[in-house]
Image: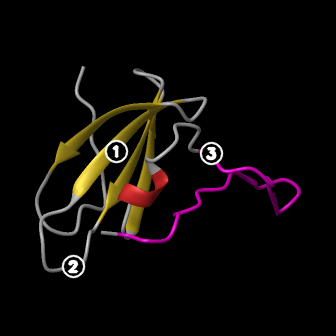
Amino acid sequence: LNTMETEIKILNHRTNSTSSIDFIKTPGISSQIVLPYGIDISKSTNEVYISDAAEFMTRGRVFVFDLEGNYKDKVNVSYLPSKVIVRN
């Protein structure tokens, strides 16, 4: 279990600066993300997917958030999840 809070920041690529607040708004979720391995955004579902490689030796997970950073769901997946593909 991750004893540290993982912070996911928003990057403004035009100014090359990051926000001072964490993207993840739901309390207790950041500490569940052990090793962030990929981030994908679906325009069709308006969701953000953060894949967690866990500890490289166990199955990973994908955390689902709305565009505001509110937790929606978590899905157990295979090892080293780095890309999410959304089918409509």
By secondary structure, the bulk of the magenta-drawn segment is best described as loop
Q: Which residues are magenta?
A: 2-23
Reading the image, the residue beneath label 2 is: 56
User: In the picture shown, does residue 56 fall above or below 45?
Assistant: below
Q: How is the image coloured?
A: secondary structure
As drawn, the residue found furthest toward the right would be 15
**Front one among 39 and 35:** 35
Rendering coords of residue 77 (x, y %): 14, 52
Whole-number angstrom distance, CA of label 3 to CA of label 2? 24 Å
Rendering coords of residue 51 (x, y %): 33, 55
Q: Amino acid at mark 3?
A: Phe
Q: Amino acid at mark 1?
A: Phe
Count of number-bearing discs: 3
Q: Earlier in the sequence, mark 2 or mark 1?
A: 2
**Element type at marker 3?**
loop
Q: Do callouts 2 and 1 mark residues in contact (Cβ within 8 Å)?
A: no
Q: Is residue 59 left or right of residue 42?
A: left
Residue at (50% x, 71% y) in the render: 4
Q: Earlier in the sequence, mark 3 or mark 2?
A: 3
User: In the picture shown, does residue 44 fall above or below 25?
Assistant: above
Reading the image, the residue beneath label 1 is: 63
Say which quadrant the C terminus sits in.
top left
Q: Is residue 23 left or right of residue 28?
A: right
Rendering coords of residue 18 (x, y %): 78, 59
Would residue 6 be counted in the magenta stretch? Answer: yes
Q: Is residue 12 left or right of residue 63?
A: right
Q: Amino acid at mark 2?
A: Phe
Residue at (41% x, 21% y) in the render: 44
Reading the image, the residue beneath label 3 is: 23
Q: Earlier in the sequence, mark 3 or mark 1?
A: 3
Whole-number angstrom distance, CA of label 2 to CA of label 1? 17 Å
Would residue 59 be counted in the magenta stretch? Answer: no
